[in-house]
Structure formats: C-alpha cells, structure tokens
Amino acid sequence: MDQSRLIKYIQELAPKERERFREFVLSPYFNQHKKTTELLELILDQLDKKSGKGLEKEVVYKKLFPKEPFDEQKLHNVMSYLKKLYHRFLSQQYMESLDFQEELFTLEYAYANNRFDLLANRSKQLEKKLMTQPYHDATYFFATYRLNYLLGYYSGNYADRSKSELFQKMLTNLDQYYIVEKLRNCCHLTANMMMMNTHYEFRFIEELLEHVHINEDNCREDHSILLYYSILMSMREENNTEHYEQLKTILDLHIQHLNLQERGDLYAFAINYCIRKINAGESNYQRELFDLYKSGLKTGLLLSNGLLSEWNYKNITALGCSLKEFEWTENFILEYKDKLLGNRRDNAYNYNLAHLYYNKKMYSEALSALLLVQFSDMMYHLSTTFLMLRTYYALRDTEALLSLIETFRIYVIRNQKMTVDQKRGYTNFLRFAKKLVLLKHHANTYSRKALEEKLSTLKEKINGTENVINRYWLVEECAA
C-alpha cells in the first residue's frame, strides 16, 4: 500500500495543501464516511514520521477494522473513496483559484433556478469587478461573454426584448475570446511545427488575421489580441521586422496590461525570434537576446510555476559562452540548477556544464561531464553529440571523431521524428565535418598554401550549400 498512487498523491502535496485536504475530508458536506477519515489520518501520521512501515496493507486494515479478518477488497474500497475525495479536492482548489469563476457559477445557478433577484444583485457586483480588471485577456473576455449571455437572455425572456445592447456585447466578447484563444494556440502550434515534424490545420486563420489587420486600430486596447497577432505574424513573415518591433513596443509600454501567462509568452516568442535570427547569421541579435534573458530571469517571467525550462537553461548557457560572459554563465548554471524539473535536472546540468567547460577550453572536464548525459530526448542527443564532436576535434582525436561522425550519421538517417529538412541539414554538416577532419588530420602532407586552398574550397562549398546545420562552426574551422 505504501507504493500506491494514493499515498504518492498525498505525499506530493505541500504541508499547507495536506492540511487543507485534511479539512476537506473532515467536512461533513464532502465526506460522511468515518473509515475514509481514519485512513487519511493514518496516512498523514506515517508521512509526518517519514516512514512507510505503518502503511502495509495488513497493518492499515487492522487499525481500520481491528476485529475483522483481512479483506483486501474492503480496504481497496476505502482507498478508492479517499482517492475520489482527493480528485474532488483538486478540482475545488482549482475552481477557487480561477478569476470570476465562483461569481459566474452563482449567476448561472440563479438564472437556471429563476432566482432573478439574486441574478440582478450579484451581476452588478461582478460588473464592478470586471471594470477594475487590469488584464483584458481570454479569461476576461470569456467572463464578460458569460455575464452578458445571462443578462441578455434574462432581459430578452423576462424583461425588455427591445434592448439589443446586451446581446451585442455578448457577441463582441465571444469574438474577442475566440480571437485571443485561436491566435494564442496558433502561435504555440506554429512554433511546434517549426521545431518538430508535426502539422496542424488552422481553419479560418487567414480570415482571422485579415480581420485583425483591417481592424488593427480598434484592437489597440485589446493588448492580448495585438500580442498574439504580432507573435504569429513574426513567425509567418520572419523577414518583416515590424512584427518583432511591435513585440518590443508591447514589452516596453504595455506589459503591465498582460497577465503572467501572456508576459511569459511575450518573452518566450521574442526570445525565439532572436534565436532564429542568430541561427540565420544575424549576430547583432545576440546581445539583445542576452538582455532579454537576463530581464526575464530577473522578473521571473522565464519561470513557469517556479521552474525554468531546460531548453531556456541550455540556450542561456550557450549565449553566455558565445558572448564570453563566463563568470555570469557559471553562476547562472549553478544558481538555476535547482529550478529545473527534477527528473531532467542532472541531464541539463551536466550538458550545460560541459558546454561551459568546452568554451573555456577545459576539454577533459567537458568530456567527463558529457559522459554523464543520457540521451533522453532527441534534442539532447543532437546537441550532446555535436558538442562531443567539437571537443574531440579540439583534442585532435581523429579516430574518435570519425567513429562519432559515422554513428551520428546513422542515427540521423534512422530517426523518424526529424523533418526532412533537419535530416538534410545534419547529413550535410556531417559530410563536411568528415572532410574537414580528414584535411586537418593530413595537414602535414600538404604545403601551407595547398592546405589553405583546400580549406578555402571546402569553405566555399559549405557556404554554397543551402541547408547546413551548425554552418558557423564549419566555416570558422575552415578559416583557422
């Protein structure tokens, strides 16, 4: 029993949440089953003692039913009921955390049960609350839609049918909610399509974008709509920097009008835009990206529920090393290690530490750290192998290099999750990397001039090939 999901779920609750769950189970409104309450008290007592010895099935059963022979099904029934209470507790907790939800449920109950005095009174209170809401986001638009839906149909069915303004507000709010949610999801899924071998059909998106473009002046106060429109257009029209400049304007002037999720999206997509520009060879975006990262860390907007994405952890480390900000980067790697997701923490920490060591020319330390990285994710596999390849190259270990290049090539060819363009980019890189390695290995057999000519020819071929991953490194080494 000590390995059951129920014990695991309760164990994962923070101390304050455990106490609230206990109060929830003790409430006769939610639970009138005495044995369920006793079971929870036994579990909490053992968790407080940090011991699972008292949670064996037979031991627990004897405490719950001291005069009865062991019946596993009976114990299972009590555990099952406690688990249902746990699920209900979570939904109750979440409902209470949502803006306007309790007020709207009250109004919807009042309307459904003809409690029109209650509807009129509480709707005025909610209207006042909505008027003071600083964020006109999807939550706000959906709440105003539900409010005006109730008031509109109440008025139409029971009061003055001639008044149309409530229904017009309802329709406008519904459109605003739909536009924000549609654009927000299209932004995230477009980014997913750009990164992974996925495809989604975005129905009505062209009409929606045209609508926002035509009515852009009317959307100036709808900061959420303008935010996600600018983000989506910055991905669809990447060479048009006006969309990115609009994101910077929102960041500088209107961020206070966005909720936490939208602020996080603003940083994330602005950062990804800079990354794509840097990958395209526009190095002037590096310092701007670094400042975005530092600002996002300082404000906590790069964190989600107190956690830092391992990919942001990786990108920040790489950029800090590229800008030779070694001291700041090392402090960052150590300081934010504990803010990584637990089961990914060691992998991310070891990889990024290896990246720092490589850039500080501490190659042996880099290899030692890389050997601790497990290939739990395709991107980790690709990034770790590339870093290992560069480290072997720096150590001039040709035998290890050629073996790694061939192993990497086979991995890329067989990988089903990579897009055709990604595979072509990596196979081109590996083909040129092998030529570079062999040229450098046989450098002593060429005159200085002949070697320079061969490296120059290789560099031209690399630059003349359309799709080459990590082109910058190959070009740098051809010039070295």
Image: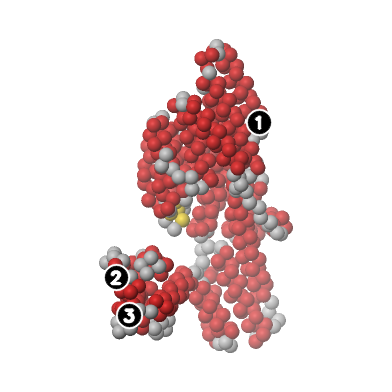
Crowding near the residue tagged with mark 2, few <14, some 14–19, many ≥20 C-alpha atoms within 10 Å = some
Which one is in front, 187 or 285? 187
Percent from the top left, x then y, of residue 401?
A: 50, 29
Percent from the top left, x then y, of residue 399?
A: 49, 27
Which residue appears at 51% of the width and 36% of the height? 386
**Residue 449 falls in which quadrant of the image?**
top right
Q: CA distance from mark 3 to mark 1?
A: 73 Å
Q: Nearer the viewer, mark 1 or mark 2?
A: 2
Crowding near the residue tagged with mark 1, few <14, some 14–19, many ≥20 C-alpha atoms within 10 Å = few
Relative to 229, residue 11 above or below? below
Which residue appears at 53% of the width and 57% of the height? 262
Q: Earlier in the sequence, mark 2 or mark 3?
A: 2
Q: Amino acid at mark 2?
A: Gly
Q: Amino acid at mark 3?
A: Leu
Which residue appears at 54% of the width and 74% of the height? 127
Identify the residue position indicated by label 1 in the image: 465
Identify the residue position indicated by label 3 in the image: 64
Q: Amino acid at mark 1?
A: Thr
Q: CA distance from mark 2 to mark 3?
A: 12 Å
Q: Earlier in the sequence, mark 3 or mark 1?
A: 3
Relative to 282, residue 237 above or below? below
Residue 426 tag number = none
Extreme residue in the front direction = 69
Figure disc tally? 3
Task: Report helix, strand or loop for mark 1.
Answer: loop
Percent from the top left, x then y, of residue 130?
A: 53, 70
Residue 54 tag number = 2
Percent from the top left, x then y, of residue 446?
A: 55, 13
**Residue 413 falls in which quadrant of the image?**
top right
Which one is in front, 86 or 226? 86
Task: Report helix, strand or loop for mark 3.
Answer: helix
Q: Earlier in the sequence, mark 1 or mark 2?
A: 2
